[in-house]
Amino acid sequence: AILNVLTDVFCGGAIETAHHARELAMHQLLQNRKEFTDKLHDLFAILDADRSGLVTLDELEAFLERPKSEDLLASLGLYIRDAWNFFKLCDRDRDSVVTVDEFVRVCHMFHGDAKALDLANLHAEQR
């Protein structure tokens, strides 16, 4: 009987610790995502040279031609080599401008380890 009590206490504590660790990991993941999104909003403001609330292909290209633009993108885990293709991916509704929501959505897909499914979905949307 004592062995059963000790087993219950040990297993209960281990399960509770594992649950708490998962909650902490999820909280950290959400916090990191929010911080990344905030940085993307800041980057969008830099791209939006005319402060219209929209980014054009010309604005994106002008940004990418600036010194240190590649370093800024790399610091966010983003690597944009081709402005035209990146712009097409962002411009979901094909109105020739990119909104902050369109920009953030695509950047999240390309940030870090882009999943094959994310890339396939983007490719399918472009058709």
Image (spheres, rainbow, N blue to C red):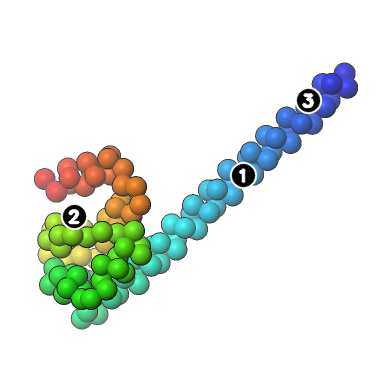
Disc 2 crowd rating (10 Å Cα; few below 14, some 14-19, many 20+) is many
- Residue beneath label 2, please? 89
Could you say where residue 93 lies in the image, as x and y percent from the top left? 17, 57
75, 34: nearer the viewer:
75
Q: Quadrant of the C terminus?
A: top left
Task: Give the numbered dot on residue 7.
Answer: 3
Spatial CA span between label 2 and label 3? 55 Å
Give the vertical position of 87 relative to 119 (above or below): below
- 2 or 1: tag closer to the N-terminus: 1
Could you say where residue 64 lies in the image, as x and y percent from the top left? 19, 70
Disc 3 crowd rating (10 Å Cα; few below 14, some 14-19, many 20+) is few
Q: For the residue marked with disc 3, what is the amino acid?
A: Thr
Q: Residue furthest right?
A: 2
Give the vertical position of 20 relative to 35 (above or below): above
37 on left or right of 66: right
- Residue beneath label 1, please? 21
The answer to whether mark 2 and mark 1 are in CB contact below 8 A is no
- Taking the spot 12% from the left edge, 72% from the top edge, the residue there is 58
Disc 1 crowd rating (10 Å Cα; few below 14, some 14-19, many 20+) is few
| Image quarter of residue 89 | bottom left
Secondary structure, mark 2, is: helix
126 on left or right of 2: left
